[in-house]
Amino acid sequence: MIRDNYLDINKLIKNKKILRLFLVVKHHGGVLRFVGGAVRDALKNIEGGDLDFATDLSPDELVEACTEEGLKTVAIGIKFGTVGVIIDDTLVEITSLRKDIKTDGRHAEVEYTDNWEEDASRRDLTINAVYADEKGNVFDYYNGIEDLEKGCVRFIGSASQRIKEDYLRIMRFFRFYSRFGIGDPDKKALAACVENKEGLKTLSMERIKEELFKLLLTPNAAPTIRIMQDNGIMSYIMPETKFIDNLAFLKKLLDDKNVPDKALVYLFALYQPDVPLAENLAARMKFSKREKQKFVHWAERKVSLSELSDDISIQKLMYETDKDFCQEKFLLLIAENKEAIPYFWEKYQSISEIPEPEFPLRGKDIIEQGISNQQAIGSVLRELENQWLASNFSLTKEKLLENARLLNKVS
């Protein structure tokens, strides 16, 4: 249960000033420990996300301790036992140990405790219920370390009960299975997810979307989504898809690459939607306006790889759309065709280096050529723009103005 000096604290924390919190809590008779994802990820030698802390002080006691030590606190979640503390301009969240008195879906009635194992029992998965102190001692109440080493992702206690406390835990289970799981999913956990899948309908789509996007970014998202679909779980949140292999193909190429809106790109690859389906998914998933515009535009504008074969073709597409669209569509075509393109990453990056063409004329330039009728101005501009495009952007402003004068004489 307790492993002395088991974890290199440097893997957990970069800003050593945060360690002051341990002394503050200790001076006021309490204990402070790291908990959750940061500990789990450090144990796997991967860079984790935000630090979370737990303490056996109550929120009021913690606020009093910090105030006496000159530390500013922020009431970010007092109702749920969480206090924000400002350390070196960094907001650190500390949650008091709790035990469930009554659970009702996502919202539980709790009371504070000083029992660390009781607090651990409230968490969802064994691998997320591991604590560590500032010396690297690790406190593991439910064999989370062993499960992490074996790639076994399982719930603490009754899997069905954990899920009923918050049905989002079904999505979390599959996300962490995709990230850390080895072999088949835990049978009890999978059975509980299937048994309680209808509970997903009670969740807000915003929460579903957040978890699904996180899942799409995990290493084994494609086979995991196949498991979810084969067990009738995906259908409770999304339409079924025939394109899981397309997602798998693209992820092999992109998972270690930095791509903007990567989860959105992966979702499109997973469904290969036409415009109606793209609009449906955007509405269903509560996309932001920007996300919806991107997603639907990818479906609307059909592109062939030949349009991305050389700089001039790319510039023409870029002029119609934008640079981001050209890069994104390039990746989506790879997924659609499941076609390995030599030096695809270099090709992707090179698109960003191609200058965006800018039509050199404006309405005032046409007026200066003696054309004043508004309808005629627009007509001449369109004709000149077509000439410019047909010349592969080679016509200069001077030549275009000369052509404008000729058009004026003809009219």
Image: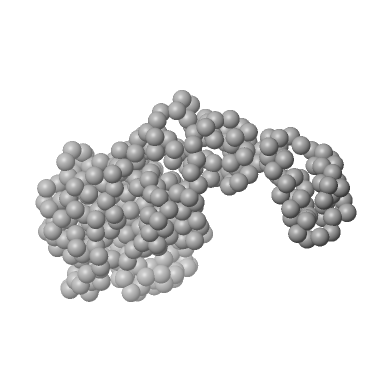
Q: What is the quadrant of residue 239 in the picture?
A: bottom left
Q: How many labels were placed on the picture?
A: 0
Residue 87, percent from left and from top: 47, 59
Residue pictured at 24% horizontal, 62% vertical: 200
Q: Residue at x 15, y 55 (%)?
A: 194
- The picture quadrant where one finds residue 59 is bottom left
Q: Nearer the viewer, residue 59 or 407?
A: 407
Residue under the point 46% across and 61% down: 288
Residue 127: x and y in percent read 23, 49
From the viewer's perspective, tell me whether residue 197 is left or right of residue 71: left
Q: Toward the viewer: 359 or 183?
A: 359
Judging from the image, the colouring scheme is one colour
Residue 210 horizontal/vertical position (percent): 36, 57
Q: 50 left or right of 240? A: right
Q: At 32% across and 49% down in the image, what residue appears?
A: 215
Res. 318 visible in picture = yes
Instruction: Determine the residue located farthest toward the top in the rendered image.
Output: 342
Query: Where does residue 39 sit, x and y in percent of width and height?
Result: 31, 48
